[in-house]
Image (cartoon, rainbow, N blue to C red):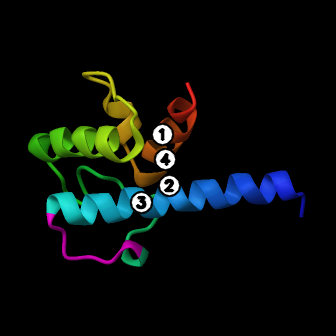
Amino acid sequence: MIPQLQEIIHERQDVLFKIKAELIDRLQLEFEPVDIDDDTFLFGGGLSLDSIDAMEIVLGVQICFDVMIPDGDISAMRTVNTLADFVLANKSA
């Protein structure tokens, strides 16, 4: 595998793990990071989070990754994967 591709994959896996760990810690969820699938919906039928949890997610992303989620941009918080996409796209910006 191309070293640059391996680095991208490793960085994404690291971000996914950190997001899951932050969700578990910040929201006091009774899961381990490996228990949460990357495509798990954060709201509704997935983790069943609510609007107060959304504010905690925004805070967690800001503290953990130094990335701001704009007010009202719930599309970034659809699933763990979309949150990781958002973090990776805005981390170096």
Q: Main secondary structure of the magenta part?
A: loop
On screen, residue 4 above or below 70: below
Whether pointer 4 and pointer 1 mark residues with C-beta atoms closer than 8 Å, the reply is: yes
Query: Who's the residue at 34% across and 65% down the image?
Result: 21
On screen, residue 74 above or below 71: below
Which amino acid lies under the numbered mark 4 shown in the image of this protein? Ala
Marks 3 and 1 sit apart, C-alpha to C-alpha, by 11 Å
Determine which residue is flagged by label 1.
87
Q: Which of marks 3 and 1 is nearer the N terminus?
A: 3
Marks 1 and 2 sit apart, C-alpha to C-alpha, by 8 Å
Disc ID at residue 15: 2
Which amino acid lies under the numbered mark 2 shown in the image of this protein? Val
Residue 38 seen in render:
no
Marks 4 and 3 sit apart, C-alpha to C-alpha, by 9 Å
Identify the secondary structure beneath mark 4: helix
- Residue range corresponding to the magenta coloring: 28-33
Q: Position of residue 93 (x, y in %)?
A: 55, 24
Marks 2 and 3 sit apart, C-alpha to C-alpha, by 5 Å
Whether pointer 4 and pointer 2 mark residues with C-beta atoms closer than 8 Å, the reply is: yes
Mark 4 vs mark 3, foreground winner is: 3
Disc ID at residue 84: 4
Identify the secondary structure beneath mark 1: helix
Determine which residue is flagged by label 3.
18
How dense is the environment of label 1, judged by Cα within 10 Å: few (below 14), some, or many (20 and up)?
A: many
Q: Is residue 2 left or right of residue 20?
A: right
Query: Who's the residue at 26% across and 23% down the image?
Result: 72
Q: Where is residue 25 in the image (x, y as percent from the top left)?
A: 22, 64
User: Looking at the image, how many numbered discs can be counted on the residues?
Assistant: 4
Whether pointer 2 and pointer 3 mark residues with C-beta atoms closer than 8 Å, the reply is: yes
